[in-house]
């Protein structure tokens, strides 16, 4: 089932329905989709990052993850003996 679900060029949203939450979480890890609905039909939420995998796009919009596209990382290495 998972191979069939992943056998596509797209990967925006996937859905898992189960009575066993632990099993659903294990299956979720193997599905190649940017968003997963686990026992839930609607996955969109203003507080959630929106985005897919494969041809459904890279990166995320909304939520905290969406701001990273506009940020630049800076690394600083300091040698200080008097601290």
Image: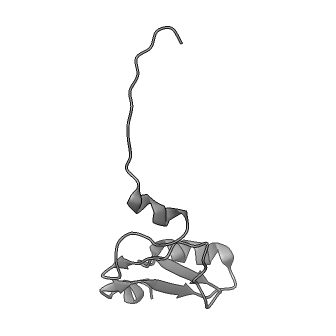
Q: Where is 10 relative to 53, above or below?
A: below
Q: Residue furthest top?
A: 82
Percent x, y of residue 12: 42, 83
When asked about the image quadrant of residue 5, the answer is: bottom left
Percent x, y of residue 35: 50, 78
In the image: residue 13, left or right of residue 19: left
Percent x, y of residue 47: 61, 72
The structure residue drawn at horizontal position 57% and vertical position 73%, both measured from the top left corner, is 48
The structure residue drawn at horizontal position 34% and vertical position 77%, both measured from the top left corner, is 57
The structure residue drawn at horizontal position 30% and vertical position 86%, both measured from the top left corner, is 9
Of 71 and 11, nearer the camera is 71
Q: Where is 60 relative to 75, above or below?
A: below
Q: Quadrant of the N terminus?
A: bottom left
When asked about the image quadrant of residue 7, the answer is: bottom left
In the image: residue 33, left or right of residue 55: right
In the image: residue 15, left or right of residue 5: right
């Amino acid at each position: 089932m998972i191979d069939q679900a992943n056998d596509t060029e797209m990967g925006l949203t996937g859905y898992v329905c189960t009575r066993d939450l632990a099993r659903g979480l294990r299956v979720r890890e193997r599905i190649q989709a940017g968003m997963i609905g686990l026992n839930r039909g609607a996955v969109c939420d203003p507080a959630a990052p929106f985005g897919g995998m494969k041809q459904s796009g890279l990166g995320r919009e909304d939520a905290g993850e969406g701001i990273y596209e506009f940020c630049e990382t800076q690394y600083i290495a300091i040698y200080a003996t008097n601290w």
